[in-house]
Image (cartoon, rainbow, N blue to C red):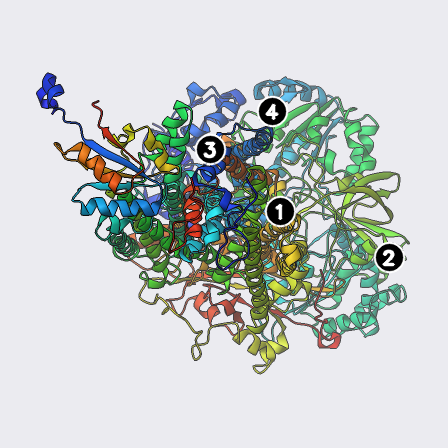
Amino acid sequence: MSDQGHEHHSDFVPRRFLLAEFSTPAGLLAGTTKMREGGYKNLDMHSPFPIHGTEEALGLKRPKIPLIVLCGAIAGACIAYSLIYFCNVFDWPLNIGNRPPHGPPANIPITFELAVLLGGGSAFMGFFALAKLPQPYHPIFESDDFARASVDAFFLSVELEPGTDIDRALADIRAAGALSGEIVEESER
Amino acid sequence: MAAPQLDVRDPLEPVALIEGAAGHTDKTINDSLLAHVWRGAGKGWWACFAVALSLLGMLVISISWTLYKGIGTWGNNIPVGWAFGIINFVWWIGIGHAGTLISAILLLFQQKWRTSINRFAEAMTLFAVICALLFPLIHTGRPWFAAYWLLPYPSTNGIWPQFKSPLTWDVFAVSTYFTISLLFWFLGLVPDLAALRDSSQSKMKRTIYGMLAMGFRGSGRHWAEYKWSYVLLAGLSTPLVLSVHTIVSFDFATSVIPGWHTTIFPPYFVAGAVFSGFAMVMTWMIPARRFLGLKHVVTMKHLENMNKIMLVTGMFVSYGYLMEHFIAWYSGDPYEFAQFFYTRMRGPMKGIYWTMIFCNVIVPQIFWSKRWRTSIPVMWFASILINVGMWCERYNIVITSLHRDFIPSKWENYMPTWVDISLFAGTIGLFSTLFLLFLKFIPAVAVTEVKELRHELAHDPTADPVGETH
Amino acid sequence: MSCDDNHEARTKDRAKRRSLPIAGQTSSPKYWRSVEERDRTSPVPGAANEFAGGTFDVAQYGQEDGNGGNSVSRRGFMQVASLSTAMAAVGACTKPAHKIVPFVRRPEEVTPGNPLHFATAYGLDGYASGLLVESHEGRPTKIEGNPAHPQTLGATTSFEQSLTLSVYDDDRAKQIRSGTRPLAWRTFLAETAARTSQLGQNGGAGLRFLISPTTSPFLGDLRKRILDRFPSAKFVSYSSVADDGATDGTKLAFGKPLIARHKVASANVIVSLDADFLGEGNEQTRLSREFAARREPSRQMNRLYVVEPAMTITGAMADHRLRMPGGDVGAFLASLVSMMASRGIAALAPLASLTHGQRHWDPKWLVAVATDLERNRGNSLVIVGRRQPAAVHALAAALNVALGNLGNTVEYATPLTSDPTAGVAPLGTLVQEIAGGGVDTLVITASNPVYGAPVDFKLAKLLERVPNSIYFGLYEDETAAACKTMIPAAHPLESWGDLRATDGTVSIVQPLIAPLWGGIQEADVLAAFVGEGDVGAHALLKKFWKTQGKAPGDFDGTWERWLADGIVPGTAAPAEAGLTVDGQALAQAVAPALGAARQGMEIAFASDPKMYDGRFANSVWLQELPHPITKLTWDNAAMVSEATAKALNLEDGDVVEISYRDRRIDAPILRVPGHADDVVTLPLGYGRTGGEKVAAGIGFNAGELRFSDAPWFDRGVRLEKTERQIKFSITQDHWTMAPDGRETPPPVVSATIAEVLNPHSKFHTEVEDRRPDPEHPQPVIHKPVDYSGQPYKWAMAVDLNKCTGCSACVVACQSENNITTVGKENVRKGREMQWIRIDRYYTGSFEDPEVVTQPLACVHCETAPCEYVCPVNATVHSDEGLNEMVYNRCIGTRYCSNNCPYKVRRFNFLNYINDYSAARELGMNPDVTVRTRGIMEKCTYCVQRIERKRISTRIEGRMIQDGELLTACQQGCPTGAIVFGSLNDSNSKVSQLHADPRRYDLLYEIGTRPRTVYLARVRNPNPELGQPEKAGGHE
């Protein structure tokens, strides 16, 4: 929106979140499922540790990480072997103590290591990419309560489309078993 | 903490994994485990840190001197081309392995007791590998070239690295190992960093930990991917840790030198690595749990399990020794035989050999007894002896094998110089410094995982979890 | 223009051309051919005075001789000077830098980058060894033997090899001085002139010359002219290791002083009495070659008996060795003689009574020797060492004559040195004169007599009484300190002169380079006393030879040929004919000398295989060279036998106080296998206190105990153990072949001639198990690379049967390949750098061991274990099977060395080249990379020589012929034990040796397929004495 320069004040539409705390992981799961069935989109849970059943509650698809890692590992192996082959066989073969230039057994270690390196690397990078991290600011941080999400509290957050009836949403979430509910609004920077 | 009313127990194990879990909530766990981070550095910490720093100073001095004058400042000679440098390299790498083993393999086996010590062990891995990484570089004659000629880049010499050399394998193995360990460690750390961020009092700490936490907000969508990438990293680390020490052992196994040229090295090195690694964890964990107040999460059960592992791996190692000698005799190779039955047992360095036998074969046997297995002082001294023994093992393999090989006319003895010794002491200093900083600024126990564990333990499939009564 | 002028011009051209490098083509060994080629090249007019007079101010010290006399060296010098590296060295010279003319005009022989070879000669004790010196752009870099020379036959000793180091030695004296006052040569000449005119008054009564023994006809002539001018002046020759015993002995035997010329080649039986004829003496190089030729395992193989106190390399080669104190050797010989007499050799009858009853030696031994000598009348030889007194030499002469060996295995001839003897006797008289105050001017050109002379002469103190003492020497050594005037000597490679070999053949000594530190030539010093000090050695030398009538007709042409060939034909001196011994007279003469030995422990002095008499003490190469037997470096030691050490409860390195007569010194003990009991052997040449930096503080000075009446050995020495201990830098401890009882295959194989000749002996199965067998090849994983398609397949063979362990190859290799030295501390740590390691193994008992030496350098394994472990491809295989080191690629992991089963790789643990002087850098071989810190190095089979030869033969469009390409070690080896060549040439010497029945591969069993193989050592024991027992051995 920066293209509209001085006017951009007026156009700024803050994202709104409904943030509700649940007492237990189980409660959180139940509440999430309820809300999702209640037709709410963009739900997310926030807990200090992973909770079993999160995927089902949020209705997530299969995680993509395993596939990414597989590709990374295979790429690593191929790069390693072809590199060795290029260097010691194709580009400049030498008589090294009567050993043949292409000695497959001698190539195993590096091939394996590079597979692990790229596999592991893609597991790590993959996660942060998919999670869109690092992300210094997220509207949800506006809530003072939310600090406890990493300590001992279990939150459900719902991103509300513009024009959602807030009171109704609050009512729904209480019905879903939340201890409290609040509206968090993205602050303008 | 309040005396436990209802003691939460691992279904299989009689001893508590978290003592007085009933008295605990996520909050109390959180605070108790982060306490040592918030608590200012005490006298004890500063004392240790001072010692560590002075040792680190020795490291800096001896490295500078080595780079300035050359390897001649060490005790190495021909035939003993490798000495302290490589011993320390192998020793530190070995120590590192226990960390990966604890955090990765035990994770895959779903060993719940792992959670309280894995962070600790992973940190140890990292720091040990950092110490190890120093040596392959500075032990070369021309480090300023070694630093990059080992990498396959189109150089003006037009020559590529020689990929049949175990040293080239080492380069890839060790750097991979370091990278993966770092990623694995950091990934596990992210949620705790978030916790630190959110429970930090001062603005500065909040900002710093905030940056490190990278805006992690415990989102369920994140957790879903997170668990996978964590498990996969663990899955990759497990074969990695085995491969790394296997490859390190290839440095010796692929050569022709009697005492090096043996096929048993890979498994025997890995076992040795785990053996010495666990010993090192013990040596650090026992004081740490006391002074950091972690007794409720690092319980006697953990220590006992580790002692059992040391007993087992110790016997692997002993079997390795037995086999070396058996093959030396059975193969009928006169040089091999002379190496084990003359040079090592009766040669000028027999003291090292017998120390090794005592520390690595005899000492672990005490862990058969439940009483000793659970006695803190006994296990602590044992762990130190085992560290010594494993260092002697490397001395035997590297130096004793080299100093008397095939042709008697070129036999030489070996005598370390002050540089050798201060390099070794220096790496211990480096390790300690890093470790103390770690203990000061990063939760020594994986808080998130302990919370998770508490819930898992408390979880009753039918009803609400126990201990949730607010 | 008168024909005179023409002649003049021609001479100038000649002079100029002669002034250019004469010995010819770069890499062709046929140096002499180049003369003809040269004669075809036309002179460049006017080039004669190209650098006429004072190009740099030579006139300043008067060496300019008007017709380019110095220009060989001057050109060389300017080439040197043009190198920036030389500037430091130049700065040390007396010439102003701005007068140095850079090397702009290239003389036709010099192709930059291609070395030239110049023939010259070097005399250790006055007798010539003919040398060829390799010169790169005027810088001598390598010494080889001159194949045309009757003494060296193309080989060298380690002493000669070390000359290219000492010529660049920065410690050499650089300034003529009188007291502390620096002198210009001209000033010195002026002062000398003044003084001599004074001395002339009374015929030079107060004028004395103390010179080294020399055979130089030229110096002899100068001496004559000096004596003509000063009839009452005297010349005295002195060497602290002189052969006067031999000449005095022949005087006893034949009535006139003679020297023995041995011909080992025709001797079936050799009895060596305290004679290290393979390791020292004027004939050593030739005798080694002749001896080795007769060691071929056949019925013709010779047999060597050695009687000696301390193990020498000759003793190590012996078939039978009897250890006894040096003082008893005479008695042994007497007993031998009388036994021969009793066996009816008439000539010896008068000597029959000489025996001194039963001695401690094994009578069987004596009988066996006697029988063998008798059986081989005419083809036997008795050699006596320089340490033995006249009587023993006389007896030996009598025995040789009686056995009819005269003319066949030995002949006697008039000594060619200007004085028959150069020992303590003549020096004694001089000392008397000095003490009597009768000496006004003493000119000392002898090598460091103050250090070498017997202590009871107290020479240093006496010299204070000489008003005008002039020392002419290479270094500011002990003698320089004791003399008023010091004249820095020009190095043998910087001087003109001439020398004669033992057979009389004359060699012209020509300089390779201008005196780097402004040294003066000996001839100039002597000439100063006939007022010709400013003429220049070259002019004088040439003038002298012009008058000798050796060159009828075109003198200059002949002269050039002499220089090119390195020998003056037709100068050999005939041997004495019709020599007879008067037995009666001899018996009376020697009887007293052979009186029963006195009791007590014997003190014995020995010239050192490395330091000789101390004159090589400043050579780092020789200091670091492992002693051929003890493998000791950077030290000397009081050597005793195991039993003696036990009796005195001494360990190696224990410092003992040696007290003899009224004197005491401290020395560390070293036990040596095969050393005689109750004898302590003290090597000379150490404990130097002169100005030489390298030599300072190395070892102890055995000369402190040397008295004029007992220059070599005497009884009555006492050893007192002190508290002190020192740690030797020994490169190999007393390892036998099976140390600590392990049963690994022995590194060296030795057998008796009988076993070798019997095809079914266990010796043959033993070696067959240790070499490839076409029928049953070693199992391999990888198919062996096929080298048969290559032009060459380089390989080496070392005949342990010929190797005496003299170590000439080690220094030759060091010189050729710019191998650094590491110093005492680093040798002790096991970091010595010599590429060739001569392993010395004992078998048998500590008392009477058999010794086998095995030169071991990189064996160039086809399946080299060092290569596959190098992470950076710094060591790889060449197409022709060389195991190559790529220095600039090496990062120094030392993995290759660890994985080398032979441990022949050397590592630069420190930057040893840091402390090279600028001058020393000039001596480096430009064909070989100088290695810095952190780099692995090893034998390359002299790849630089291979490539040079490859280039030159390619230009000629042909293959390299077998034998025209020599590695440095091979070329230096006096016995021809090392053979190098291509296995693809089935007729090559090396191919034949690889097929030799004695061939075995070191560590064959681990499958490295080495290209260097060994031929087993063979001994020829006397069946009557049986086998020396082969026990496991010691330590």
The residue closer to the viewer here, B177 or B165, is B177
Quadrant of the snapshot with the N terminus of chain B? top right
Comparing marks 3 and 2, which lies closer to the viewer? 3
- Residue type at mark 2? Leu
Comparing marks 4 and 2, which lies closer to the viewer? 2
Q: How many marks?
A: 4
Does residue A75 appear in this view?
A: yes
- Residue type at mark 4? Gly
**Residue lying at 8% horizontally and 21% vertically, measured from the top left:** A4
Q: Mark 3 = which residue?
A: B441
Have a look at marks 1 and 3 and say if they share a chain: no
In contact (CB < 8 Å): disc 3 and disc 4 = no
Q: Mark 1 = which residue?
A: C127
**Residue lying at 63% horizontally and 21% vertically, measured from the top left:** C177
Give residue C705's position: percent from left, percent from top.
81, 41
The residue closer to the viewer here, B360 or B321, is B360
Q: Quadrant of residue C660?
A: top right
